[in-house]
Every structure is written in C-alpha cells, then in structure tokens.
Amino acid sequence: MRRVHNEAILPSGTRSGSPPSRPAVITAEDLTKTYGDVAAVDGISFTVMAGESFGLLGPNGAGKSTTMKMIGGVTRRTSGRLSTMGLDPDTHGPEVRAHLGVVPQQDNLDEELRVRDNLLVYGRYFGLAMSYLKPKADELLEFAQLTDKARAKVDALSGGMKRRLTIARSLINEPRILLLDEPTTGLDPQARHILWDRLFRLKEQGVTLILTTHYMDEAEQLCDRLIVVDKGRIMAEGSPAQLIREHSTREVVELRFGSERNATIGSRLSGIGERLEVLPDRVLLYADDGESALEEATSRGLRPLTSLVRRSSLEDVFLRLTGRSLVD
Amino acid sequence: MTDARAVPSAHPPEASAARARRWGAFYYAEQVLRVMKGYTWSILMYSVGQPVAYLFAMGVGLASLVDTGSVAFGGVSYLAFIAPALLVSAAVMTAANEFTFPVMAGFKWRRTYFGPHASPLTPGQIAAGHIMAVTLRLLLQSAIYFAAVALFGASPSGWGWAGVFAATLAGLAFGLPLMAYSASITEDKGQFALVMRFIVMPLFLFSGTFFPLDNLPLAVRWIGWISPIWHGTELGRVLSFGYGEPPLLTALHVAVLCGLAVLGWNLTRRRFARRMGQ
C-alpha cells in the first residue's frame, strides 16, 4: 500500500486513534550486556507497544544508552532475547534500523555540510531518491523551525537548533519508531520546551517514542509509561502518575536549614508526614497534605531558611527506590 | 487515502534495508564526496600545483646537474625517471592525509561515522564508502598529475597513463593499513604527525624516488623493498618507459601492492566493526 500524508510529518496510517490492542514493537526479555566483568545492562525485560511513548529513566551510567543501542542492533547483546519490529537486531541490523529514527545522546551532524544537506545525505543512507528527499527535507526543516537556516553551516547553529536538526534528520525516512537518547540534555529551558513541543506532535501523530532521560520533568511530560533503571536493573515500571502514587506521597515539603544543620534538625521532624528524607542540602517531608505538614514543623519551633510545598515527582520516586538523587 | 497536498511518502523500511544492503557503501561514498566537494578548490590546486612545482624544480632545475640519459636512469631523461616516482609519492601523501585525520574525525572529533551507523548502513560499508571516495580522489588527482607529466614530455611510452592506476594502487597499499591504525586510535597524541615525519617522509626519500634504490647501501635499501612508494614507482617506470625490469619483479610489485591494500581493507573493516559495535 502506498502511504501518503498531508500536513503532518508522518504517514497518517495510525493517526486516527490506536486500535484497541496495539501490537508490541519492541520486546526485551532478560536483556543483558556486559563489558568484561561489568554488567551495563543486567537482565531487563520490557515491552513497548506501537504508538506508545516509553521512557527509560535513570542516572548516568544506568545502562539506558546501551539498551537503546541494542534495540537498534548497533551493539550486540550479551544474552537475553530482543525483538524490534519482530526482528532480531543482532542478525537483522539494517532491516531493524530501516524502521527507526535515532537521535543520539551526542550530536553527530555533519558539520562540514550545510543544514539541508545533512538531511539529504542522511536520507540517501536509506536509499531514498532525491525526488522524495528534497521536498521532504524542506518539510522537516519547517517542522524543526529551521527553514531560514537551510543554507547555513551546522557550525553556526545553537545547541537547541542542532538538536532540532538531529531530530529532523531522524525523521527523514518516516520512521514509526523514534529512539531519543537524552534528547534535551545540555539545552536551556526555552530550547527544551520547543523540543518537547515537537516531540509531542510526533506522539500525536502516532509515532512510537522511546526516550532515555535523567530529567524527571521530561519523563513526566513525554512518557505514557516508563521504567526506572539503576545499575542496569529495572527498579520500577508504570506511568508517571502510577509510579508517584505507588512510591511517594501526594505532596512533598522541602525545608532548608542551612547545610550544617539539615542533618541535626532532621531528627526533630520525625513523626510528621509519612516519611522523612534528609539530604545534604535539604530535608524532604513526604505527606499527602504538605501545608499541614509544614505547619506542624513550624509549630515545633523549627524555622527553616526556605520552605516549599510541591507535588511529588519522579525524582522522589527515584530517591525512594535507590536512596540517591537522579542528577548529582 | 489521497490528498491534493500530499507529499509522496518514503518507500517502506524493507526497501530501505534491501537497498542499503546492496548499495550502502556507495551511499556513504556519496557523503564523503559531498564533504570533499566543499574543498574542491584546494583539492584542484593541490593536484595541479604540486606536480607543476615538483616537475619544474626537479625536472628542470635538478636535472641540469644530473647525467641524464644514463643507464642508471633507464636510459631516459632524469625528468622521465623521476616523474612516475613523483606521481606515486603524491598519491601516497594524499592517501596518508585522507586515511588519518578524517578517520579520527569520524570516530572521535566529529563522530560523523556514528550518524550513518544508526541508519541501515553497516560499519564495513561505512569503511568501504570512505575508501571508495578516497580512491576516486586518488584517481582524479593522479590523472591531473599525469597530464602535467605528459605536458612536460616526461612519459615516453604509450602506456604511461596506466601509471595513474599504479599510483592509486600504491596510495591504497599505504593508506589502507594506515586507516586500520587510525581506526584504532582513541586518543590523539600527535600520532599522525609522527606518521608523516617518520614514515611517510623516509619512504618518500628512500624508495628509489630520486635515484635508483641500488645506489643506497644495503643497510637502508630494505626501506625501499617494503615501501609501497618503491613498488608503485617501479611499476610506474615499467609502464612509462619500459625500464627493462624482469617481468617477475613487475608481477611482484603488483602482488605486494594488492596484498597490502587487501590486508589493510580487511583490518580496517574489522576495526570499524569492533569500534562501532561497542
């Protein structure tokens, strides 16, 4: 069947809502990758459904990027089973990668080529004809808000623009699955929001997004479902809301007493809320009603330098599961 | 499912994969050539300027001091004697550049190899594409060089033009093992500068370039025997003016050059696969 589409970047085949039972596009069972004695990925299992936005949340070195590389068949797995679009990436690397769009952690654009040429050249790797690539490149530049930079050298782009160009490049073959490895790391807040908006549009068009991140806000914004990964293992799995519900309270009170005093004052807060977490720079009080918890703390005569009541986030989930912060 | 504003969609992934499996190396070669196109002017200047300068300096300047037409020089003018050597040396030097810095850029400095590696292309195809593009550059450069040699009247035989292929082969015989080495370097500690100074330059000087290899003492003559520049040069001389060399020796030159190129290509392919597959 010849697929066509209109204003959108991707074919409209699945845009009109997902079928009730969506097929699995990626299945990993007991997936393992070891380098010497070190297990970068240590027996993880997960399934990603078509059209889903799936996240791997974890700190640097958790094994997220290695997992992404195995999905695309650019790194061979040590053991376990893995299927991408029904194919084994280790034996059918080119066939698997023909289905994918990949946004790597580090930009690897061709800095010696112009912006538009980067898209054309990349499209050629998929054997796509210039008659398709030229209008497609223009369309993607529009999507990435880079039309006026089409003739510019890549060197001249800002970090956010390079990232958007990398995303545009990953879409040149109209992939149904997009792998995004730390898509917004190193970008300023405004650039991140522009990028999230673009990714959200792709999600709306039915593209399966698989992204790694160590930003909990990013995971909350973009992921329908995620796995929390630490040291190559899955710590928890679920939707962001579900994970927060299961592993944290509704609200959190952040109290700062000054770095010297956080630890000593921590003991005087016991009994307030459901749980207490003393970090070097602040004390976290987990409670369903943050305001009352804060009131109770002040009623005990404690005067924090700053206090903040907020909703629980995935950061709290991670802290609970691993005893460590996501971003050091 | 048609729309007046419709843009035709991409062919299905299966077609992408099938084409990439078949033509992937060519697709990557296309990319390297596009990058080279940005340097067209300097490539042309180098290809034309270098032979003219060398041929003039050596062939006209130095030749006036040399006993030209002597038996040692194969009975031809000094210019005709050194022209194949200059042609081959230029190809080897270009290969030494094209198979070092760009490889390091691909793996480390710009990471340009990793972009195509996420596409259906395989590491072996990326290596092959790079090699094909450089081969094309060597052919073009050597053809221009040979045209200059012919204009200087320094190619007596009708077979001199085949020296273009001998030079390209010599470039690959030297360049491909070097490419395998480049692909193994993870940290730049000035290794390439050392390669240029302590390998390329001695080979250039001690490969029977400016005088027959037999004139050198045995202690350094071996440099010529293992040098792709010497094998390429001798082959070029056979093609350019006969040279009276035993046919077996000529066959040996071809065998050594082909052997080094094939060995280098294989090592390169393995290194690329290993390094990208981590």
Image (cartoon, coloured by chain):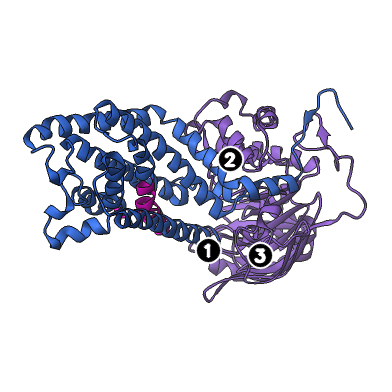
Q: Which of marks 3 and 2 is nearer the N terminus?
A: 2
Observer able to see residue A302? no
Amino acid, disc 1 = Pro
Which quadrant is home to the N terminus of chain B?
Answer: top right
Residue B229 is situated, as x and y percent measured from the top left of the image, at 28, 49
Chain whose colour in the figure is blue: B
Which numbered tag is attached to residue A229?
3
Which quadrant is home to the C terminus of chain B?
Answer: bottom right
Which numbered tag is attached to residue A313?
none
Q: Earlier in the sequence, mark 2 or mark 1?
A: 2
Say yes or no: labels 1 and 3 on the same chain. yes
Point out the frontmost of discs 2 and 1.
Answer: 2
Chain A on-screen colour: purple
Amino acid, disc 2 = Arg
Amino acid, disc 3 = Val
- Element on which disc 3 rests: strand
Residue A9, quarter of the rendered image: top right
- Element on which disc 1 rests: loop
Magenta span: chief secondary structure = helix
Q: What stretch is highlighted in magenta?
A: B169-190
